[in-house]
Image (spheres, helix red, strand yellow):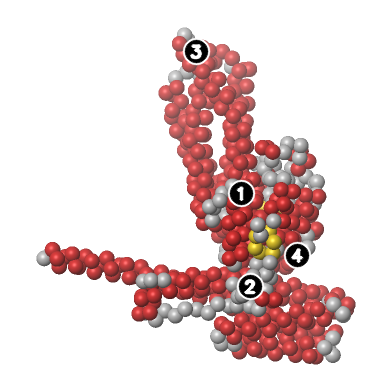
Amino acid sequence: MFGALRLWRRMASWAHDSDATYHDLIARNKRNSVLLVVGFIAFTGVLVGLLSAALVGGEPAAAAPVGLFAMGVAGVVAVWSYYGGGPAILRMSGAERIAKNDDPQLYNVVEELAIGAGVPVPPVYLIRDTAMNAFATGRDPEHAAVAITWGLRQKLSRDELQAVMAHEMSHVRHFDIRLMMLLATLVGIVALVTDFFWRTLRFRSWSGAGGGRRDSKGGGGGMALVLFVLAIVLSILAPLVARVLQLAVSRQREYLADAGAVELTRNPEAMISALRRLDADDEVLEAANRATAHLYVVQPIKKFEKRARGLLATHPPTEDRIRRLQQIVVTPLAGAAT
Amino acid sequence: MTALLGLGGLLVVVGVWLIGIYNRLVRLKVRCEDAWAGIDVQLKRRYDLIPNLVETVKGYASHERETLEAVIQARQVGIDASSVGDQARAENLITGALGKLFALSEAYPDLKANTNFAQLQEELSSTENKIAFARQHYNDTVRQYNTGLETFPNNLVGGTFGFAGREFFEVELDAERAAPKVEF
């Protein structure tokens, strides 16, 4: 047990977090989830306010109620995303819930790990896709779900399956799932809304070219122009910021989930061989999109992203993850094995 | 008057503090009991599965009586065990006996091909894993409880109210999967 604890600390330090313990990690994920929601609401308010000012053309004061209203809507969206995000992600991925009789081994493996992690047994979902991947989602361990693709399920041995599911259970246990779920839904919505505004903006400039200009005589025109430019800059930045945020939070937690998985299963070899198998697979998971990419155990849209390594990857390179796992040497502890 | 008030205040503060310690010890103890219940469920499941397994194996390898007997006996020892230590020893016995039985099944292709047997093997090895995980969890809670009992001033409160330390559920080293350790 102490060995595992040391291992934990060591792996945590690999993720550039020398003092991160298990509880700090959970606390940080909860805090970041709150920050994300607050940031989302504030961002939406400002963005919508500015956009509306730009579209209507004129008084910034008139934009304030619009912005406030947008913040209210964003709050409702955030609440929806908190309670309904998990099921929504599962639906989006085409995951189907399975019972124990459908796949006793998979179910047993998840049950074992839930006992080991001290969390309730999450419902198990199967994605009918031959690509190889897995993910976990939900707002907390009591409302979590794990999903695996049929392709991955078929190709793994029991130990490898245990390693992959242990990785997912670590995400559940660390509350990674809450932050990741909020990111997936909120980022998706930000992208959707900015998209919509872009279209509206273009539509206005084509059809109602006179509309804005008529109201803004003299001094108001300069102001409208500033707001207009600001709105454009923001709506270009919005998806980018959201994207980079998503990447930054995702990669380091993959290392930690690998470490957490090995802490549970005490079997780094199985994790390594499972990662090798996953890496060898080049198939694109059709159900994954840019909003959900960071949820999976390995990057689901590899073919496209393999060229764009580094900052734009949601996952660390598999070789790097394997290298870190290989540094763990399993040696029997002397004395009582507690 | 003020001295009396001060004394009263002090007594209240100490009282609240003692109640806090007492409640913490109760919480830790209940967690141990929950964790033990988690092991118990899996042990019972294993006792339920074993007779089915023995019956199935008998149909294919009835002359392997010794191995089958060992499994049945070990199961009985487990059922009869009363203390945590006895239980742990009995479970080691069962794990060993089952291991031998499954190793032996390799020599019987018909048995290995039997779906019922394959199912039982999966269920039993899963139950074994669950026992191992539940044991880790139990030992963690016992360690917290025992530490909570031994530290000052909890030991005074614990002693007064009759809290007793709990036994770890320990397994033999070779039956246990080695704990990972990072070498530098």
The Cα atoms of the two marked residues, 4 and 2, are separated by: 28 Å
Give the residue number, with chain letter if any, for mark 3: A221
| Mark 3 surroundings within 10 Å by alpha-carbon count, few (fewer than 14), some (14 through 19), many (20 or more) | some
Query: Which element type, helix, strand or loop, lies under badge 4?
Result: helix
Give the residue number, with chain letter if any, for mark 4: A158
Lower sequence index among marks 4 and 1: 1
Q: Where is residue B125 in the image (x, y as percent from the top left)?
A: 72, 73
Q: Which of B79 and A151 is in front in this view?
A: B79
Residue type of the residue flagged with mark 4: Arg
Residue type of the residue flagged with mark 3: Gly
Q: Nearer the viewer, residue A321 or A43?
A: A321
Lower sequence index among marks 3 and 2: 3
Query: Which element type, helix, strand or loop, lies under badge 3?
Result: helix
Same chain for mark 3 and mark 2? The answer is yes
Picture quarter with the C terminus of chain A: bottom right
Lower sequence index among marks 4 and 2: 4
Which chain is mark 4 on?
A: A
Find residue A15 and name its label: 1
Which chain is mark 3 on?
A: A
Q: Which residue is drawn at 60% across and 83% down?
A: B87
Q: Nearer the viewer, residue A7 or A82?
A: A7
Residue type of the residue flagged with mark 1: Ala
The Cα atoms of the two marked residues, 3 and 4, are separated by: 68 Å
